[in-house]
Amino acid sequence: MSKHGGKREGAGRPTILTHEEKLVVGALCEELYKQHYETARQQAIENASPEVHTTYLKLDSIQINKRKQWLQSEEFSDHYEDFIFGLQTDQQLEDEDDPERILTIKIKRPYGVIPEIIASVSRERDLKERYVKTCWKEFKELKNRIEQKK
């Protein structure tokens, strides 16, 4: 029996999705939002310290099992000097000034993507945008309830 009015069997407005299907739609929206946020985070890191970011990419390219050996090499000494120089450049310091090694990076929430995500999921799942928004809201409410119980 439908929960959308009417006493007799089959009366009232039919349900579009089951509760589980609604959660899947909401989770899809949340995942797309996280992807946008991650892109914004990566961009903020690159913009906060472009010199250090390029140096970090070089370090990241070294295989983990070879890093210990690399830390004792001449190449590491050059790399470390480049890293310190990059920090000084990014922080606009003189050569003899010690740079701050902890950077505060402010990540802005990806504005304007929520309607885009809702429209995208709506087209993909052939649902009305308002219904997708409701599914996303229900998913976030469930997620928050679960996190509060932890």
Image (cartoon, rainbow, N blue to C red):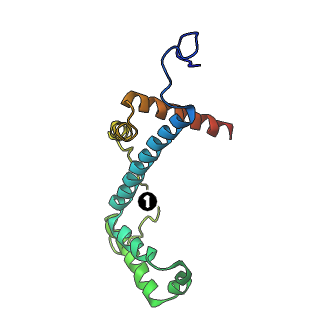
Residue 23 image point, x, y percent: 53, 37
Instruction: Please tell me which residue lies in front, 51 or 36.
Output: 36
Which residue ends up furthest to the front in the rendered image?
Answer: 9
Specify whether 65 is left or right of 99: right
* Image quadrant assignment for residue 65: bottom right
Q: Identify which residue is drawn at 41% across, 71% down.
A: 56
Task: Examine the rendered structure and indicate whether residue 76 appears above or below residue 34.
Answer: below
Q: Is residue 60 visible?
A: yes
Q: Identify which residue is drawn at 35% across, 59% down.
A: 48
Specify whether 150 is left or right of 34: right
Task: Examine the rendered structure and indicate whether residue 104 appears above or below residue 2.
Answer: below
Amino acid type assigned to the residue bearing label 1 in the image: Leu
Label 1: how many Cα within 10 Å (few below 14, some 14–19, many 20+): few
Residue 136 image point, x, y percent: 47, 35
Specify whether 71 is left or right of 90: right
Instruction: Please tell me which residue lies in front, 42 or 19.
Output: 19
Q: Is residue 107 visible?
A: no
Q: Identify which residue is drawn at 36% across, 55% down.
A: 44
Circle 1: element type: loop
Residue 8 image point, x, y percent: 58, 11
> Where's the N terminus, which quadrant?
top right
